Amino acid sequence: MPDRRLAAALCLLGLAYTAGLGQVLAQAPSPPSDAVNSMLGGWEMSNADRDRTCVITFKLDPAGPGRALEFDKGCTTAFPNLKDVVAWAIGKDDALRLIDAKGKLILELNEVENGLFESARGSDALYFLQTVAAAEGREQTPDVMFGSWAFTRNGRSICQITLMNTAADTDSFALQTAAGCDALITAFSPRGWRMDRGQLVMLSTRSEIWRFEESEPNTWRRIPEGRQPLLLLRQ
């Protein structure tokens, strides 16, 4: 009898552990998709005449039914329909959805060409969304990026790299790191790079991705910044 009771108790403990583990796994957020990552950073919204503009910063942090965003001062004055927007999400066919606190769709935009979004049919007006770099005419092409750069953190250089003009594969250019790089860089193990929607995308040997956004001429910051902001400076 004691053996049966012990076996029953162990069985119940096993079931409880399995249920608890299942709940934890269900609650664990899935890694953001490339479509989500490509939206991070500052984007400019404008109307068809471009006499009204507004900068929206898309973030990874969870916010209500989606991810966090931040409007520049005056956004809701320029575009009153944004006043109820509290989050963003990527929907069907990688459409960008701006939603309210209950998840209700306020505005949907579709990518009509690389890096340029347009409001979906049925919207009350025509709106466009492009990266701030593209809107300001400073979106860089690969040929401008070739050459020597340095990763810096807290004002200190931690790795010298060269963005090369030779192919790493069919979709990206090769890069070369100098000896003596910080553990943060060697752990990532960069192998290639490309430009995407005005962002510099760096690829690792394990197909992981770092994205950088130009914050000022010849200075790129990793997005999202995280606890250890990482900059890439032209040498």
Image (tube, rainbow, N blue to C red):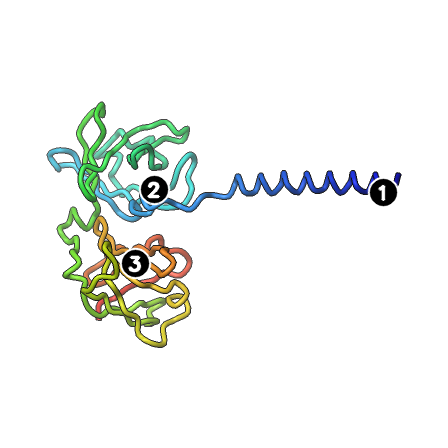
Place of residue 206 in the rendered image (x, y in percent of width and height, measured from the top left)? 38, 58
Q: Which residue is mark 1?
A: 3
Give above or below for 137 relative to 27.
below
Q: Which residue is mark 2?
A: 69
Give above or below for 77 relative to 144.
above
Depth check: 228 or 211 in front?
211
Asked if marks 2 and 3 touch (Cβ < 8 Å), the reply is no
* Residue under the image location 63 percent in, 38 percent down: 19
Place of residue 228 in the rendered image (x, y in percent of width and height, measured from the top left)? 40, 61
Could you tell me how many numbered marks the image carries? 3
Q: Amino acid at mark 1?
A: Asp
The residue mark sitting in front, 3 or 1, is 1
Secondary structure of residue under mark 3:
strand
Q: Amino acid at mark 3?
A: Met
Q: Quadrant of the N terminus?
A: top right
How far apart marks 3 and 1 lie (CA) works out to: 59 Å
Place of residue 11 in the rendered image (x, y in percent of width and height, measured from the top left)? 74, 40
Q: Residues within 10 Å of mark 2 (few under 14, many from 20)?
A: many
Q: Quadrant of the C terminus?
A: bottom left
The residue mark sitting in front, 2 or 3, is 3
Give above or below for 158 relative to 86.
below
How far apart marks 2 and 1 lie (CA) works out to: 58 Å
Q: In the displayed orientation, state which residue is furthest to the right.
A: 1
**Tag 1 or tag 2, which sits nearer the N-term?**
1
Residue 223: image quadrant is bottom left
Q: In the displayed orientation, state which residue is furthest to the bottom.
A: 179
Give above or below for 193 relative to 55.
below
How far apart marks 2 and 3 lie (CA) works out to: 24 Å
Depth check: 106 or 84 in front?
106
Disc ID at residue 202: 3
Q: Residues within 10 Å of mark 1 (few under 14, many from 20)?
A: few
